[in-house]
Image (spheres, grey):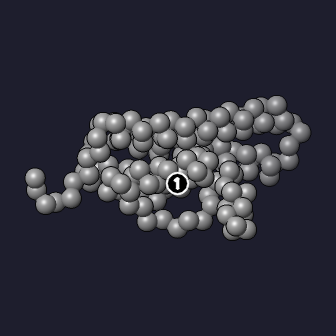
Amino acid sequence: MTHTQDINPSEDTREKIIVYLELALKDAEKRIMELEGILRKNKQKLEDDAIKEYEIEEAHYKGKVKLLEDAKSKTERTSGHTLKKAYNKKCMEALHATLPEAKYTELEALLAENGIHLHHDKHHYGKHHHEDQEAVAAA
């Protein structure tokens, strides 16, 4: 056993992490489909600004999908530093935006247990979280 801190989650842990990534991917892909549907059905009725906003949001979600797929493939096949790099700030923001708060917190704990500590600010990046965080703040 070397004393370099290598990050190599067990197969079981990897599978758990992948479940979260797949949930996040489903959410992001669902949102892309919703946006595409809105654009397809309403293109004539929408103002140019609104169309741009939907297209920008769609592009953001497509970016999130790419980050999440990348993290998923790295989780399936790599260890150590590469795996840590997969869960960078952008990836965590994508996960935060696409997972319910409780699931995000569970994933964060699971990653931390495996030496992947996340250093990103806890602003809410997504549509799900605003109410959750207000509820927490009120408690």
Nearest to the observer: residue 12 or residue 19: 12
Q: In the rendered image, which residue does mark 1 sit on?
A: 105
Coordinates of residue 54 in the picture (x, y in percent): 73, 46
- Between residues 135 and 128, which one lies in front from this camera angle? 135
Please state which amino acid type lies under the numbered disc 1.
Thr
For the view shown, which residue lies furthest in the right direction? 45
Q: Is residue 3 left or right of residue 112?
A: left
Q: Quadrant of the C terminus?
A: bottom right
Quadrant of the rendered structure where residue 71 is?
top left
Residue plotted at (77% across, 36% down): 39
Residue 132 x/y as whole percent:
68, 57
Front position in the image: 117 or 89: 117
Can residue 52 be seen here? The reply is: yes
Can residue 84 be seen in the rendering of this structure?
no
Q: Residue furthest front?
A: 139
On the image, the x and y values in percent for residue 47 come to: 85, 47
Q: Is residue 11 left or right of residue 43?
A: left
Residue occupying the point 52% across, 54% down: 105
Secondary structure, mark 1, is helix
- Whether residue 3 is situated above or below residue 55 in the rendered picture: below
Residue at the image position 82 percent from the left and 31 percent from the top: 41
